[in-house]
Structures are given as C-alpha cells and as structure tokens.
Amino acid sequence: MLPPALMQTQLQGQPVAAQERRLLRIYRTLESDSQETLLAFAEFLAQRNDAGPSAAERVAVAEPVPEPRPAQETVIAAIKRLRRSYPMLDSGTMLQETSQLMAAHVLQGREAAAVVDELEALFAARYEALKGGGKTTETGAERS
C-alpha cells in the first residue's frame, strides 16, 4: 500500500514532484517489511510536523480565473481558454480526456458546442476535486 499522501497527489491531478517520484520508485523496490518501516518513519515525521499548519493548510489551491466563453468557440480555443482559466491543474494528467473529447469532435463529428460544454465540466470537476482533496475517476467524477 502506498502512503496516502502519494496516492492523493497522483489522484488529485496535481503534478508529482521529482522527489516524490524518487520516493515512490524506492518504495516499490523494497521488501514488504522495509515498506512498513518506511511508512512508519514517514508517519513519525508527519506527526512531528503536526505542531505547524496541516498539509491542507500549507497547500492552498488558487482560484480559477474565468474567461468569458465566445459565442462560436472552437474546441482548440476552448482547451486553451480553460488551461488559462485553470492554471493550477496539470494538463498532462488531463491529456487523455481532452484528447478523447477532441477526437469525438474531429473524427466523429460531434458538435463543438457540446464538446466545449463537456470540457468545461471536466475542468470544473478536476478543480473541485483538487480543491476538496477528493479522488477522481478518469472522467473527472468524484468518488469516495
């Protein structure tokens, strides 16, 4: 089992820092008893830091900067606008979903307005999950 902090970082759509990736690689190479020791030490360090602000208080999520939606907006323009509006979201973790929506428009002929509606819902759901610390599925829907 991965430490909850590492699991949350990946699932919230936040970029994983190089040190976190390194820790994860090391964790995966350890035997089960060594993994437990590493977790116990990490929990010890976390408790030692409890005197200060909590992790949730230390990590403040910026508010989106909404831009008005143009009347005849293309899907590409919408993706660019939403990335500017939600700079706190990691576009790399959303690449598959945005690509699927773009492909539905280009290859399957879905109306641009419908795809843009879905893109807006996707970005909003990912932001809410990041802000609330929830875990999201690949479609951005929140799970518990």
Image (cartoon, grey):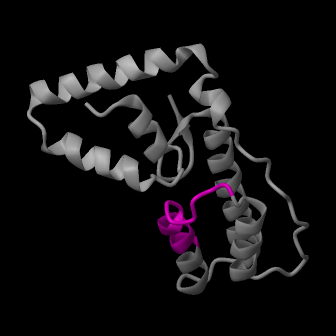
x and y percentages locating residue 61 in the rendered image: 70, 43
Residue in the image at 36% along x and 17% along y? 44
141 or 52: nearer the eye?
52
Residue 136 percent location from the top left of the image: 52, 43
**Is residue 92 highlighted in magenta?**
yes
Q: Quadrant of the N terminus?
A: top left
Please give the name of the residue rendered at 86% of the width and 59% of the height, measured from the top-left corner. Answer: 66
Residue 37: x and y, percent?
19, 23
Figure check: 131 above or below 14: above
Q: Left of 143 or right of it: where is 62?
A: right
For this view, does 139 lie left or right of residue 131? left
Name the residue rendered at 67%, 28% in the picture.
57
Height in image: 44 above or below 89?
above
Q: Is residue 89 left or right of residue 78?
A: left
Report the front residue among 109 and 71.
71
Q: Nearer the viewer, residue 142 or 7?
A: 7
At 64% from the left and 77% from the top, the residue drawn is 110
In the image: residue 66, left or right of residue 6: right
Residue 115's image quarter?
A: bottom right
Q: Which one is nearer the viewer's eye here, 73 or 64?
A: 64
Q: Where is residue 79 shown, x and y percent of the image?
A: 69, 73
- In which quadrant of the rendered view does residue 109 lie? bottom right
Magenta-drawn segment: 88-101
State the count of labels: 0
Query: Residue 57: within the magenta?
Result: no
